[in-house]
Structure formats: structure tokens, C-alpha cells
Amino acid sequence: MTAAQATPSASPPTATPAGTTRRPRKRKRQLWRDLPAWGFLTPVAVLFVLFMVAPIGYALFLSFRTYKTQGLGLGKGARKEVWNGLENYAKALSDPEFLASVGRVLIYGLVLVPTMILLATIFALLLDSRRARLKQFSRVSIFLPYAVPAVISSLMWGFLYLPAVSPFHWLAGRAGVSLPNMVSPNLITFAVANIALWGGVGFNMVVIYTSLKAIPSELYEAAVLDGCTEFQIAVRVKVPIVAPAIIMTLLFSLISTLQVFAEPMTLKPLTNTVPSTWTPLMKIYRDAFVRDDIFSAAASSIVVAFVTFLVSFGFLRLVQGRAFNEDQ
């Protein structure tokens, strides 16, 4: 017997399933690659939880609570915080001041939002026109009011509205013309809407103008070859293409309209036509910090947040449904 025959043959190595040793390594490599991204996202997530999620949760908790007076109501332990169920929501939804403020905001939105989106679209189309001159200066001039804080712009327009200090009223008086009082009860809604319009058109214009600059120039050349005028190109080519940007600005405008606070709150000391409950947020502020009714204010704020979410979600669903039907 030879030595080769005497030695037992070595057993072949068992084959391991493909990928069993590589998957953990790939996962570790992927984890190390994603680690910087998670590092950048962590501060944002922490701030979002601390300053958005936690306050909303605390407001939701307070909306179901109330104070119960014990005994004669004297001393530190006279008031006790107890569960109140849905009483705060029923009180908020049946409050005539809250319902009146909602009505005023609806009228304010009907005046402001269509005008703002229409002007922003017109300005964006004019700036994108081939015949436009001084585009950079015009862009900055239209956008500049957006950089002014709402409180400062409200104070500026408030003094321009007041007949006693307004230079417009002084010049009109010298010319023998009487201007309407913009802070009168009949015009105060238009006065507040004008402040928001002056500051919001520039932002929406920039969004729509940016979308216009992304349109390929070949589409314009093809439209010119087909005999389209500048106006027809704007209406039939540009506007349909930038419709998603217009819808986005419309959604942002709706949300900001439901949350209007700074403009009427700043005008309130200048005139008696703006009550402390002119908008829902003003009423919430009064209930929380003037009347010390934090629980009713929390319930009202949850109602406003829910309505804002409902309006924005319903608007997006409506727009998406129409777009889907048109594609079919």
C-alpha cells in the first residue's frame, strides 16, 4: 500500500450560503456611511420634538383639564386641576366670539389669498418675459417687503392709515380730496389684508419665478414657431407647467391666513375697530394670558390646528384628484 493510499483523503470544505459572511460587513459599512447623515439629522429631530411635538402634546393634555375650586377658594390649595373631558371643546365651539373671529378670518382669506397669488403669478410672468428690463432690480424690489418683519410693516402701514399722521391724508387734504379711513370698521379687513399682501407677494413670486426658470427654452421656441404671441406663451405654456408651484404657494397662503396674528395685533393699539378677539389666535392669546384661562385656550388652539390640517389636507386631495382625472 502506498503512502498516498494510506492517508485518508481530506474532506472537501462545506460550502457556506452565498452572502452569509458578506451581509454583516455590508450592513456595517452602510451603517458607517449613514452615521454622518444621522448625526446631522439628530439635532433637527431633537429640536422638532422639543419645540413642536412636545408643545402640541402638552396643549392637547391641557385641553382636557380645568380648575376646580375647593371650599371658599382661598389659599394656595383652593384650586385643583381636574379632568374636564370635552367641555373645553364644547365651550370653544359654542363661543360666539370664537365663531365671529372665524368668520372674519374667512372674509380676510377670500380677499387676500386670490389677490396675492394672482399678483405673484403676474409679477413672475413679467420678470420671465424676454422684453423685461432691470430684472434683478425688479426682483429685489418685489421681494424686499417680505424681508421686513410683520410687526414693523404693520406699524408702518398703521401710521400710514391713520388720518392724523398719514402723509397720504395730508397730501389729499392739501389737494381738496378726502381719502377713506382704512381703519374704519368697514375697511379694517382690507387694511389688514393689504399689509399681508405687501409682505407676501414677493415670496410667492420668487417661488413661481424659480419654477419658470426651470422650463426648457425649446418649448418657447416651438411655441414661437407655431405663431404664439408672448401672452399666449404665458397663458398656455408657462402657467400650466408651473401649476404645481402655484398650488404650493396657494397652500402656504391658506395656512398663513388661518394663523394670522401679528398684523391685527399690532394695529389693535392704534384703533378701536380691532377687538382683542379679531382672529382666533388673538382670542386664544387673550384667554391664555389676559383671562388666565389656559385650558380653554388650549382647546381653541387644538381646534385651529385641526381645521388648518383639515383644510390643507382636503385642498391637496382635491388638487391631486383633479390632476389624476385629467391624466386619465
Image: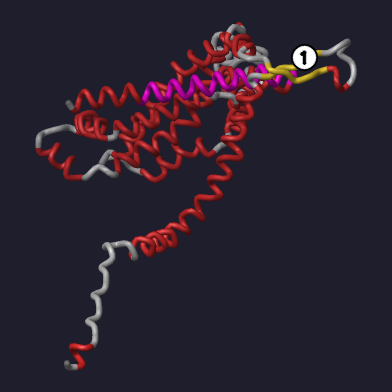
Q: Is residue 122 above or below residue 7?
A: above
Question: At 52% from the left edge and 10% from the top edge, which residue is drawn?
Answer: 103
Amino acid type, label 1 = Lys
Q: Is residue 242 above or below residue 82?
A: below
**Is 309 part of what is drawn in magenta?**
yes
Left or right relative to 76: residue 196? left
Q: Is residue 31 above or below residue 190?
A: below
Q: Position of residue 222 (x, y in %)?
A: 13, 40
The residue closer to the viewer here, 303 or 212, is 303
Q: Residue furthest left?
A: 226
Q: Which residues are magenta?
A: 290-316
Q: Residues within 10 Å of mark 1 (few under 14, many from 20)?
A: some
Q: Position of residue 164 (x, y in %)?
A: 66, 19
The residue closer to the viewer here, 98 or 1, is 1
The residue closer to the viewer here, 289 or 32, is 32
The residue closer to the viewer here, 324 or 105, is 324
**Is 185 part of what is drawn in magenta?**
no
Q: Secondary structure at mark 1?
A: strand
Q: Position of residue 256 (x, y in %)?
A: 50, 27
Question: At 52% from the left edge and 16% from the top edge, which residue is drawn?
Answer: 105
Q: Position of residue 257 (x, y in %)?
A: 50, 23
For label 1, the residue is 68
Q: Quadrant of the C terminus?
A: top left
Q: Main secondary structure of the magenta part?
A: helix
Q: Is residue 184 visible?
A: no
Which quadrant of the figure has residue 323?
A: top left
